[in-house]
Structures are given as C-alpha cells and as structure tokens.
Image: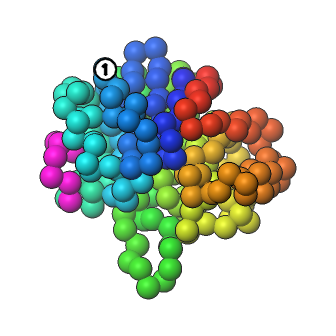
C-alpha cells in the first residue's frame, strides 16, 4: 500500500490495482483535484477542510467510474455526485480494497455546537489496514496497522492525541489534520506523539510526501 498526503487530511491510497482518495478538502492543493484514474472517493464528514464542495465536482467529473462513499449527513447535503452512504461497521469493496466504516459522530468542539456525523474508515488490502478517523479520537478499532493521526484541531489537545495513539496501538503512524498548527509550534505536538505514543515507526510526512506500508 502506497499512501500520499495531499495537504491536511487528504490522502491518496494506492494498491497494485486500486486508487482511492480520502477527504479531498479545502486545504488540499490543486494537484489533488487534478487526479484521474481513481476507483473511489471517500469523505469522512461534511466540514470544508475534508470536502471542498467548490473543487470536488471537478474531481468527480474527471473520475466518472469512482465509487463515492460518505457519511449520511454529507450524502443528504451535497448536490453533486451519486454518493453511497457509509456507516459504522458497513463494509464496501472498492477494487482490491475493503473499506469499513468506523464510528458515527464528530468530536465535541464546544458543548453548544451540535455534533455532526463523522464516519472514519479502515482501508484494508494486501494484509495492511490503514485507519483514517476523520475528526475524532472517540473510536479505536482493533487491527490497525497504519494510523493517519489527526495531530491538531479545535477539538483536540495533546494529551488526548497521545492517549488515542496508545489506545489504537498502530505499528506505523503519520500525521494528518495539521495545517492548523503553526510551523514554529509543530515540534511541540509531534515530539509528544513520537516520544510518548508508543509507536516506534512514527513517520513525519510532509504535505505532499508519500510512504510505502
């Protein structure tokens, strides 16, 4: 499995025969929205940093055969594409990748704000399972080999980030959801995860870096 970051929460996941984009959001570069030959486009929730509703229609048009998978609230709201609803425990096969929904709700930002839907995803192929949780630390499925770790958000603090890594216990992790962190402050977040999370293979991937797992 080859994983390429495209800014913030967006990933391109590739196997020998399948290409899937996860969370093509507003913080992602134009290169993401120019991708073709995609087999699937997966959205964990409706927030614009996870789904850019201005540029995403072009991505869908360039990939007419892609399976479109998202949480139920996003499926109700978007006015483009034929989306399949994802949900906790639901299994969808896209090429040689098995996509399983994880969880139901976004993390609490402040108690006064209603919690929207958020369905994380497990992507499994060739004996490797990648977990992209979207925007929450609430759910920690078993059998995660690779964790796309949300590193900074209005709903998170460092102690919760470390505890989430310790709970999931991945073999490998790399950061996502980190464009809300100033460059000067970034080491304070990453150092705590790499020192205390308990995952020896913690890969500090940049915004357009790729890695093999």
Range of the magenta residues? 77-85
* Residue 115 picture quarter: bottom left
Q: Can residue 140 be seen by looking at this rendering?
A: no
Residue marked by disc 1: 37
Asked if residue 84 is among those painted magenta in the image, a careful observer would answer: yes
Residue in the image at 27% along x and 42% along y: 56
- Asked whether 86 or 2 is in front, the reply is 2
Horizontal placement of 131 versus 184: left or right? left
Secondary element at image label 1: loop
Q: Position of residue 8 (x, y in %)?
A: 52, 47
Give the quarter of the figure containing the N terminus: top right
Q: Position of residue 143 (x, y in %)?
A: 61, 40
Q: Is residue 188 above or below residue 123?
A: below
Residue in the image at 34% along x and 34% along y: 33
Q: Position of residue 136 (x, y in %)?
A: 53, 61
- Asked whether 68 or 6 is in front, the reply is 6
Q: Main secondary structure of the magenta part?
A: loop
Horizontal placement of 103 versus 137: left or right? left
Residue reaching furthest bottom? 112
Residue in the image at 31% along x and 23% along y: 36
Residue reaching furthest right? 195
Residue reaching furthest front? 184
* Residue 71 picture quarter: bottom left
Give the quarter of the figure containing the C terminus: top right
Q: Position of residue 87 (x, y in %)?
A: 35, 53
Horizontal placement of 131 versus 69: left or right? right
Q: Can residue 133 be seen by looking at this rendering?
A: yes
């Amino acid at each position: 499995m080859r994983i390429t970051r495209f800014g913030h929460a967006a990933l391109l996941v590739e196997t020998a025969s399948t290409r899937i984009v996860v969370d093509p959001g507003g913080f992602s570069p134009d290169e993401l929205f120019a991708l073709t030959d995609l087999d699937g486009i997966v959205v964990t929730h409706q927030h614009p940093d996870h789904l850019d509703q201005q540029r995403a229609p072009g991505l869908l048009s360039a990939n007419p055969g892609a399976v479109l998978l998202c949480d139920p609230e996003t499926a109700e709201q978007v006015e483009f594409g034929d989306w399949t609803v994802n949900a906790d425990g639901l299994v969808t096969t896209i090429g040689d990748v098995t996509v399983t929904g994880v969880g139901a709700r976004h993390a609490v930002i402040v108690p006064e704000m209603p919690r929207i839907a958020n369905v994380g995803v497990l992507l499994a192929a060739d004996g490797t399972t990648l977990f992209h949780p979207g925007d929450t630390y609430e759910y920690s499925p078993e059998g995660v080999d690779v964790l796309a770790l949300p590193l900074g958000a209005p709903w998170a603090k460092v102690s919760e980030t470390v505890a989430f890594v310790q709970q999931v216990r991945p073999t490998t992790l790399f950061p996502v959801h980190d464009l809300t962190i100033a460059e000067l402050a970034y080491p304070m977040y990453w150092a705590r995860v790499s020192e205390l999370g308990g995952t020896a293979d913690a890969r500090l991937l940049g915004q357009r870096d790729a890695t093999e797992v």
